[in-house]
Structures are given as structure tokens and as C-alpha cells.
Amino acid sequence: MYLHTSTERRFLAGAWLTLAMLGGCSTDKEKLLPHGATDMLDVWQQGTTGSAGSASGRMLLDARQALRRPLEPRQTAARNDNAAFTRTAENEIHSQFKRLPNPDLVMYVFPHLAGSDPVPVPGYTTVFPLYQRVQYAMPGERTEDY
């Protein structure tokens, strides 16, 4: 069969597409995706540990046990050397980065008029820091006076 026009070709392509869609709708779900006796937890456990008595499952458990070995004395000593740089509740209180002194300035504001309708404001005293930002010393840097 030889198609002469593009309209005939489009019609044939549409017919094939319609038949394919109808064929997809007529597929039985149970036949395509059968339900087994296992649930997702069983599938997960079988995928991660293998079956209960299999050699691959045993090798995986042995590898996990090797990773859970205790620390060697050399590793424990290295861990203790770094204890001063580790964040704990105790050294958070006594911080490694000390705050540098930022003296407070006391300023007296004289009585004045303020706002679009001149409202009298009584004189008052206020306190503000000398430096805009809080500065921190590096670890070990001296923060007390010489």
C-alpha cells in the first residue's frame, strides 16, 4: 500500500497510536505487576543483607564488624591531643575566641524638641559601644592589658 498524501500518513499514524493506547489500557495489572508474599521491608532486608544463610550476607556482616573495631591506643592518643579544639559544653563556656574589649561610651542627650510637631524630649543618658562590631581574638592571642 502506497500513501500519496501527508493526510493519509497522519491518519495511519493516528490509528496506530490509538491502537497502542487502547492496548495499554487493556493490560491486566495483576499480570503485569504480580503481588508476591514479600513486602517492602523484606525486599529491603534481602537487598542489604542477602538471604538469611547466604555467603554474601555473611560477608557483609563480617565487613560491618570490621568497621566496628575498637580504637587503637595510637588513635586514642591522637583524639586526646585534639580535645582542646573539640566543642564541648565545658569549653563552650570558656570560649577559645575571647571577645576583645569594646569600651562603653556614656553620652548625655540634652533636652530638645523632636518630630514634625515640636514635642519636648527631656534630657537622658544613653550607653553605646565604642566599636560598631564585636571583635574576637584568635586562639592564643593575648586579650588582657600589658
Image (cartoon, grey):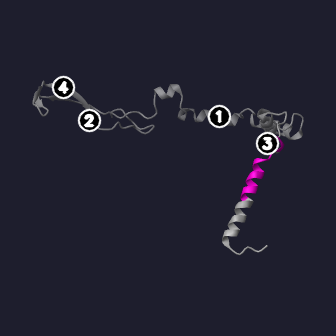
> Would you say the residues marked 1 and 3 are in contact, meaning their CB atoms lie under 8 Å apart?
no
Depth check, mark 1 against mark 4: the one in front is 4
User: Counting other residues with Cα less than 10 Å from the Cα at mark 3, is it few (<14), some (14-19), or many (20 or more)?
Assistant: few
Q: Quadrant of the N terminus?
A: bottom right
Residue 18 appears left or right of 108: right
Image location (x, y in percent) of residue 109: 15, 29
Residue 100 appears left or right of 115: right
Residue 1, above or below 119: below
Q: Earlier in the sequence, mark 4 or mark 3?
A: 3
Q: Earlier in the sequence, mark 2 or mark 4?
A: 4
Which residue has dot 4 on it?
125
C-alpha gap between disc 1 and disc 3: 62 Å
Q: Main secondary structure of the magenta part?
A: helix
Which residue has dot 3 on it?
29
Depth check, mark 4 against mark 3: the one in front is 3
Residue 132 appears left or right of 85: left
Query: Which three-letter amino acid code belongs to the residue tagged 4?
Result: Thr
Dot 4 lies on which element?
A: strand
Residue 49 lies in quadrant: top right
Which residue has dot 1 on it?
77
Residue toward you, 81 or 34:
34
Q: Earlier in the sequence, mark 3 or mark 2?
A: 3
Dot 2 lies on which element?
A: loop
C-alpha gap between disc 4 and disc 3: 81 Å
Q: Earlier in the sequence, mark 1 or mark 4?
A: 1
C-alpha gap between disc 2 and disc 4: 16 Å
Which residue has dot 2 on it?
130
Image location (x, y in percent) of residue 128: 25, 31
Specify the segment rendered in magenta.
17-31
Dot 1 lies on which element?
A: helix
Dot 3 lies on which element?
A: helix
